[in-house]
Image (spheres, helix red, strand yellow):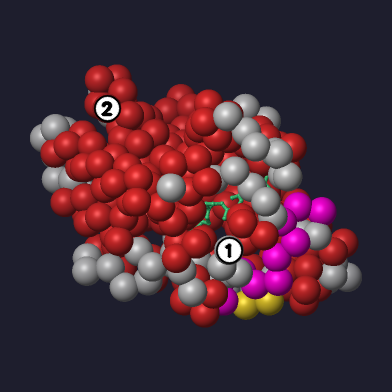
Amino acid sequence: MKINDGLVEKLKCELDEYLKDYMKGKGSYNKRVYEAMAYSLNAGGKRIRPILFLLTYMLYKDNYREVIDVAASIEMIHTYSLIHDDLPAMDNDDLRRGKPTNHKVFGGAIALLAGDGLLNEAMNLMFRHCIGKGQNALRACSIISESTGAEGMVGGQTVDILSENTRISRDQLYYMHSKKTGALIKGSIISAAVHASAAEQEIKKLDYYGRKLGLAFQIKDDILDVTGDTAVLGKTANSDLNNNKTTFITAYGLDKCREMCSLITGECMDVLKGLKRDTSHLENLTLFLLNREK
Ligand code: GRG
């Protein structure tokens, strides 16, 4: 990812290092599952969600290293969801983050366990983080956990699976994406604000920002699915089309989607500017997400 923001680049490097070190030397007879977990975790994701978490935290507090474990746990959850999403029982994809998918390398059973292992490791990290830290840390981790469950990402993925080969309404489409993609993006932002003891009024504004950002991110993802190149995306282009899914493109058309995406990104920028804090890095990341090519 090339984003013209030194702090974002630095956070990404630190997260990459943290995640690489985390799996080193783990396991004995069970080593294979750690290898599979590390394979997907270190395959080169953009780290958008943990960076959003750290940048939001830094609106209020200077020392982001005190919460880098929570940020890492968010990336573990996201990576687990990608491994499971790629399985033959779900989207059946061969390529992810520019590499063969987890099950292509390790087989379906280990890929399933690697996803489970990453989700549980994320919970371990968050529980350990909360020891002795008080209410806000607990509230923050609980927001992250809730955003990934049946009322969040898992719920959205359920609707996605059930909607294959059918046409769903625009209302269902919004529900599906606000949960599947939006919930963890919003959860990453809100949990950081809560952890950093932001005022309720500011948490409300960030909630709105997170919701809109998640939506813009998904519309952009749908645009890239039809306009992007497999080699650049690092995942198979036209995957939604091939799986006969209702997307923002099938519901609104490409031109309208482009218009919606920049309009919603504009709304995100307005919320950030209204916060009266140094939101410049979050603004750079928001614009990067609108203009990204993968
Ligand atoms: C299996 C419970 C479960 C959930 C899967 C995340 C997800 C839910 C499915 C992935 C399918 C998909 C392409 C969703 C669209 C948005 C999205 C989450 C894209 C991938 O996220 P990026 O672009 O990926 O942040 P990197 O690789 O950069 O981390």
Image quarter (top left, top right, bottom left or bottom right) of the N terminus = bottom left
Residue at the disc numbered 2? 205
Q: Residue furthest top?
A: 200
Q: Is residue 275 above or below residue 201?
A: below
Q: Give the structural element (helix, strand or loop) at label 2.
A: helix
The structure residue drawn at horizontal position 52% and vertical position 31%, both measured from the top left corner, is 170
Place residue 100 in its image quadrant. Answer: bottom right
Label 1 environment density (alpha carbons within 10 Å; few <14, some 14–19, many ≥20): some
Q: Residue 247 at what x, y percent from top left?
A: 54, 45
Q: CB of residue at label 1: within 8 Å of ligand 1?
A: no
| Front-lying residue, 161 or 28 | 161
Label 2 environment density (alpha carbons within 10 Å; few <14, some 14–19, many ≥20): some
Residue 173: in sight, yes or no?
yes
The structure residue drawn at horizontal position 82% and vertical position 54%, both measured from the top left corner, is 89
| Front-lying residue, 4 or 142 | 4
- Along the horizontal axis of the image, is 52 left or right of 268? right
Q: Is residue 213 above or below residue 12?
A: above
What is the magenta segment's predominant secondary structure?
Answer: loop
Q: Amino acid at mark 2?
A: Lys
Q: Amino acid at mark 1?
A: Asn
The structure residue drawn at horizontal position 29% and vertical position 46%, both measured from the top left corner, is 259
Q: Residue 202 at what x, y percent from top left?
A: 25, 26
Residue 44: in sight, yes or no?
no
- The magenta-colored residue range is 89-98
Place residue 281 in its image quadrant. Answer: bottom left
